[in-house]
Image (cartoon, rainbow, N blue to C red):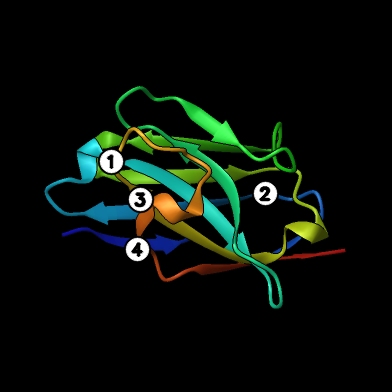
């Protein structure tokens, strides 16, 4: 069993920064990959970033490359999403998620546990 709690969202002006956190609890947390997704009303939930816990390999959507960084702290079983140079179009509910290894990191269908979501609002 795995449980995820994501946090760190808030209101920020364009060009600002936020850091989201995702705490994982469960005996299998250390052997699973982690990802971040986001969703706005009326749109599909979309991939943002992912990290393979075994190899520390990272993946990013084209829209956030160079601005967002996904990282981990294994001692705390926590994954972070550092978001810099935020834009109004980054406004969304952000969800952390986890999946078993050896599958596509950006494929939402592979993720089987999800956090509750945290709201990020970027004003102009």
Q: CA distance from mark 4 to mark 1?
A: 15 Å
Marks 3 & 1, CB-CB < 8 Å contact: yes
Q: Sequence-wise, which precedes: disc 4 or disc 3? A: 4
Q: CA distance from mark 4 to mark 3?
A: 11 Å
Q: Sequence-wise, which precedes: disc 4 or disc 1? A: 4
What residue sits right under mark 3 in the picture? 98
Q: In the shown orientation, is residue 120 left or right of residue 112?
A: right
Occupied quadrant, residue 54 = top left
Query: Which residue is drawn at the image coordinates 26% and 44% (left, top)?
Result: 77
On residue 5, the disc is: 4
SS class, disc 4: strand
Q: CA distance from mark 3 to mark 1?
A: 6 Å
What residue sits right under mark 2 in the picture? 17
Marks 2 & 4, CB-CB < 8 Å contact: no
Q: CA distance from mark 2 to mark 1?
A: 27 Å
Q: Sequence-wise, which precedes: disc 2 or disc 1? A: 2
Question: Can you give x and y, in whole percent of width and height, for residue 72 in the image?
Answer: 38, 36
Question: Can you give x and y, in whole percent of width and height, for residue 103 in the image?
Answer: 39, 37
On residue 32, the disc is: 1
Q: Sequence-wise, which precedes: disc 2 or disc 3? A: 2
């Amino acid at each position: 069993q795995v449980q995820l709690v994501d946090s760190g969202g808030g209101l920020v002006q364009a060009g600002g920064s936020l850091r989201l956190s995702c705490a994982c609890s469960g005996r299998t947390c250390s052997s699973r990959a982690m990802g971040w997704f986001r969703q706005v009303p009326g749109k599909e939930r979309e991939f943002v970033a992912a990290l393979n816990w075994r190899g520390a390999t990272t993946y990013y959507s084209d829209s956030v490359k160079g601005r967002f960084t996904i990282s981990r702290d294994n001692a705390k079983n926590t994954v972070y999403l550092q978001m810099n140079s935020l834009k109004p179009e980054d406004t969304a509910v952000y969800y952390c998620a986890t999946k078993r290894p050896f599958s596509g990191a950006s494929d939402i269908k592979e993720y089987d546990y999800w956090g509750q979501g945290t709201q990020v609002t970027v004003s102009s």
